[in-house]
Amino acid sequence: MDPRRSIRADLGAIDDRTARAFLEVCATAIAAEVRRFVPSVRVLQGVDEDDLVALARAAALEAYATWTPSRACTRRTWAARVMRWRLGEAVGRALERRDEYLEKPEAVLNGANPSEVYDGLERVSWLQGAVAKLPKRHQILVAAKLRGESTSATGRSIGIGKTQASRQLHEAIALLAEAAHEVGLDGSEHDQ
């Protein structure tokens, strides 16, 4: 049997209450393991700390499902090990993909003008920095919007209603537009 299929079956056997309780017990270890890998993902486009947290939580539950007393460690220690392994594997794969693109710039450019690509990358970098300066809820709403997710569903996931989520998303977009205008990224002329 495929080990991944076996793990999925084991995870399916964990009830919701047990999973939540174990994730609470592992909260400190999850935060510590994520902090270990945050510097690595800062150079990766499309991977952020929230992705690492989600992966660490899934790895903790995998550890809960696969732990046995014969492992000669506590379930929590086993969870920390599995989180470290899974995060390391995922970040390593992402870095390898990034390195492949860096080794073959023609694949990235795909016939585009290099200066246009550079300008685009500068804008993306600026946008990432500007979004990071927004309040956390605004960050979540903007990221979800960029991924094409529904504002009302995102609002529910962070504990606010559809109207408030929509209002906060519009506030975030207005703040980003104002910041873009201040640095001249909106195409308008401004005094330096």
Image: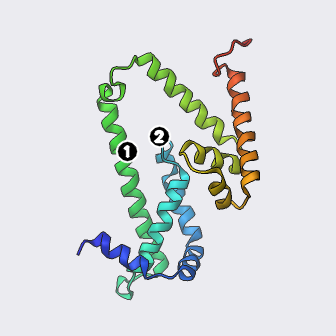
Disc 1 element: helix
**Three-letter amino acid code at the position of disc 1:** Leu
* Picture coordinates of residue 68, whole percent (x, y): 38, 85
| Nearer to us in this view, 19 or 60 | 19
The type of colouring in the image is: rainbow
* Picture coordinates of residue 83, whole percent (x, y): 44, 66
Residue located beneath label 2 in the image: 45
Position above or below: 171 against 189: below
Position above or below: 20 against 136: below
Position above or below: 111 against 72: above
Q: Report crowding for label 2: few under 14, some 14 to 19, many 20 or more residues within 10 A (C-alpha).
A: few
* Picture coordinates of residue 170, whole percent (x, y): 73, 40
Residue under the image location 54 percent in, 68 percent down: 29
Residue 55 appearing in the image: yes
Q: Quadrant of residue 159?
A: bottom right
Residue 78 appearing in the image: no
Disc 2 element: loop
* Picture coordinates of residue 135, whole percent (x, y): 72, 46
Residue located beneath label 1 in the image: 95
Residue under the image location 25 percent in, 71 percent down: 2
Position above or below: 191 against 26: above
